[in-house]
Amino acid sequence: MPATRAQMLKAPPAELRRAAAVQLILLALLGVVLGLACSRYVLVGSGLSLIPWALAAFLIGSRGRSTRRAVVDAAAFGFALAFSFMCFGYQGRDPLTTRILPFSVLGIVGAASALLLALVGHRIRGRRRP
């Protein structure tokens, strides 16, 4: 995988797509891990769990190479985070499969929230650069 911006500009499109896909998968996995951690081990039952989620989405945006990448990566992260948080924390009587649709809707809300925070992070980063 190319390391510098100049190398990225020279890289073939297939290699760029592969690198972007790997990054997207890793960020979604990070969302699942953070969802599990906050639903079972850290800040359980507290609204304070929103703070690391927001910081992670902001950092994804601030580190994105482009606005499009920042938005797509943050949306995948936010959906995976919110959906997995709901699934790992579910303790109802009904089977989990009956909660897939409501949890998916909440996942979309998580994706939208992460997307907005990533946009803010990306814009702030852009203002810092000369």
Image (cartoon, rainbow, N blue to C red):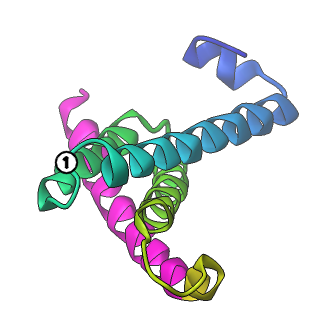
**Would you say 41 lies left or right of 50 here?**
right
Q: Residue at x 67, y 22 (%)?
A: 8
Question: Residue 17 placed where, x, y %?
Answer: 77, 39
Q: Give residue 100's quadrant in the image.
A: bottom right
In the figure, 109 relative to 16: above or below?
below
Q: Is residue 114 magenta?
A: yes
Q: Give residue 29's quadrant in the image.
A: top right
Q: Which residues are magenta?
A: 102-130
Residue nearest the observer in this picture, 25 or 128 = 25
Residue nearest the observer in this picture, 49 or 39 = 39
In the figure, 2 relative to 19: above or below?
above
Q: Give residue 92's quadrant in the image.
A: bottom left
What residue would you read off at disc 1? Answer: 43
Residue nearest the observer in this picture, 111 or 128 = 111
Q: Which amino acid is tagged 1?
A: Leu
Residue nearest the observer in this picture, 127 or 65 = 65
Q: Quadrant of the N terminus?
A: top right
Classified by dominant secondary structure, the portion drawn in magenta counts as helix
Q: Secondary structure at mark 1?
A: loop
Question: Residue 91 placed where, x, y %?
Answer: 42, 72
Q: Residue at x 44, y 67 (%)?
A: 111
Question: Residue 23 placed where, x, y %?
Answer: 62, 36
**Would you say 88 lies left or right of 12 here?**
left
Q: Residue at x 55, y 84 (%)?
A: 99
Q: Is residue 39 magenta?
A: no
Question: Residue 37 placed where, x, y %?
Answer: 37, 43
**Would you say 77 lies left or right of 17 here?**
left
